[in-house]
Image (tube, rainbow, N blue to C red):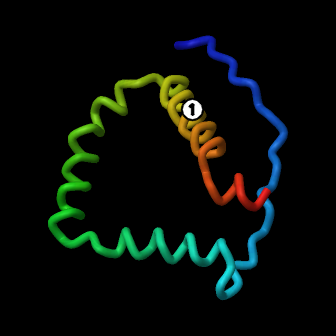
Amino acid sequence: MSNFCMPITEPKNEPVKDYLPGSEEINLLNTVLAVYHQAGPKEVAMAIEAAMDSKQAWMDFEWSQRASIFLKMAAKTMSSCTIRQTLT
């Protein structure tokens, strides 16, 4: 068992967005949805197969390693998200 101790930071709420017609938030959301809706049964099957192929490797990681991956992903998302940079 690992003696890993992860610091817990004070949670902060994100700003509430209105998603009004014509707003930057709604335009970006519509753009993202327009891309993702184009996936068909073949792409869905490929995504499921890829997820199942990586399941055991993911389960072999200790919880602290998995948490580290999610924290890194969250940090990169927060630093590169154009919505947050533009609206905050």
Give the secondary structure at mark 1.
helix
Question: Which quadrant: the C terminus?
Answer: bottom right
* Residue 64 higher or lower than 49, as above or below: above
Q: Is residue 42 left or right of residue 29?
A: left
Based on the displayed image, in which of its 4 quarters is residue 9 positioned? top right
Measured from the top left, where is residue 33 in percent x and y? 45, 73
Residue sitting at x 50%, y 24%: 65
Q: Nearer the viewer, residue 69 or 34?
A: 34
Q: For mark 1, what is the residue? A: 72
| Residue at x 75%, y 71% (from the top left corner) | 17
Residue 80's image quarter? top right
Tell me the residue at 63%/37% (across/down). 75
- Up/down of 39 relative to 58, above or below: below
Q: Residue 77 at x, y = what percent?
A: 58, 45
Residue 10 placement, left or right of 74: right
- The percent coordinates of residue 2 (x first, y second) are 56, 13
